[in-house]
Amino acid sequence: MKNAVLQRCAPVLALMLLLTGCAVNPVTGEKQLSLIGESQELALGAEQYTPTQQTQGGQFYVDPELTLYVREVGQKMARVSDRPDLPYEFVVLNSSVPNAWALPGGKIAINRGLLVKFDDEAQLASVLGHEIVHAAARHSVQRMQQGMLINAGVAGLGFALSDSQWSGLLMGGAAMGAQLALAQYGQGDELESDHYGIVYMKKAGYDPQAAVELQEIFLEMSKGREAGFVDGLFATHPPSSTRVRENSKLVGKIGSGGYRGADVYQKKTAFLRKVQPAYDAHDEAMKLASDGDMNAALTKVDEAINVLPREAMFYSLRGRIHQELNNPDKASADFEKAVSLYPEMFIYRLHSGLNALTLNNLSKARENLTRANEVVPTSIAFLRLGDIAVKENNRKEAIAYYSKAAESSGDIAEEARRKLAALTQ
């Protein structure tokens, strides 16, 4: 009976797969598997763009003109792409890790740590064009369909990443977005993005030789294992001699020459380069804190704040250091400053809420943890909201929060399950 049903359904199932599973790559024209439709693709990118930005450092808000410039260059490249009608967006992220990524639907980000490596606008256009092809050719969607995802990490947590309490931190869609941003592309996708990105550069009037130069530089850096690139661009976009060779061949065919924009680029990135010492001091403070030298880390982060006192990231790190030095009141002031400078950033509210809980300021803790979860839901926030509910004798609310935290993994999930069991016995 079962076999008969399967035999009758087989033609219908085959037709459904034929209709829903076959599509054409919008860039290459080749057939590809398509189980995720364009409407789902656009919705996924739109939903995950903000939380993914935040898990990778948040926006570089201290220099909004730089983001506008990157957006202009990105849109110039997007207009000559094979999917010019995608709702493209471009943002600069506040991370020293040299990287760039694209989510489905044309949601693209580039880190300030990569921008300081470029010499001119043509090199910027090369990287943005490469990411535009990833979006236009639906590479992220293809990786989702093939299950080619990795475990997500959270760049904004800094030295706490080594702590077991932060394992499995991200929950729901935020984890998916981070996976898409951090997953490694295969060589086929990279070669495809290189090829058509160079074509887009030529169409937009840029010198495609800049793309060859960048790949040559990145390949040399990868051989030398330059710090930062190994964890950033080289991890997600692995360079190779094949890529350099294929890019050179293509430029030889279509011809080099075109706009470079060195003077404009240097002018647009002047502020970023001016304040780079502050971020260098911050990164050094992070390393010192990771090594357990909190007093030296405190001195370094103070240097960063003196150079750029309106950077929320610096106060958040100093607050973390004060926590490690058992100065929760000083930590509270720093976290409040970070939140005031960048109220939308989930990690600043998360740290502020966790610190407030240690001071038994339940209302402040609840407000910040709740606000953090509204942007990027995390298991640690749900767990501590459950603790707050217990302190306030709200058993029903505590069960709900602990149940949510228990859906994660690692130490946080285990603690949530223990506390949930104690409440439901």
Image: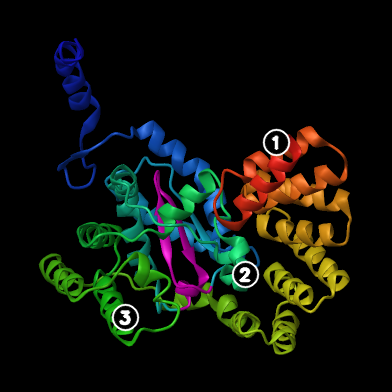
Element type at marker 3?
A: helix
Contact between marks 1 and 2 (CB within 8 A): the answer is no
Of label 1 and label 2, which has the lower sequence position?
2
- Extreme front residue here? 425
Of label 3 and label 1, which has the lower sequence position?
3
Q: Camera-side residue: 103 or 112?
A: 103
Residue 194 seen: yes
404 relative position to 341: left or right: left
Q: Residue at x 57, y 71 (%)?
A: 162
| Residue kind at label 1, given as amino acid type | Ala
User: Marks 1 and 2: which is nearer the front?
Assistant: 1
Q: Residue 194 placed where, x, y %?
A: 24, 63
Q: Camera-side residue: 288 or 202?
A: 288
Q: Quadrant of residue 406?
A: top right
| Residue kind at label 2, given as amino acid type | Ala
Of label 2 and label 3, which has the lower sequence position?
2
User: Marks 2 and 3: which is nearer the front?
Assistant: 2
* Residue segment shown in magenta: 96-116
360 relative position to 342: left or right: right
Element type at marker 1?
A: helix
Residue underneath mark 2? 160
Residue underneath mark 3? 222
Q: Residue 68 placed where, x, y %?
A: 54, 59
Q: Pointer 3: residues within 10 angstroms few (<14), some, or many (20+)?
A: some
Is residue 108 on the magenta stretch?
yes
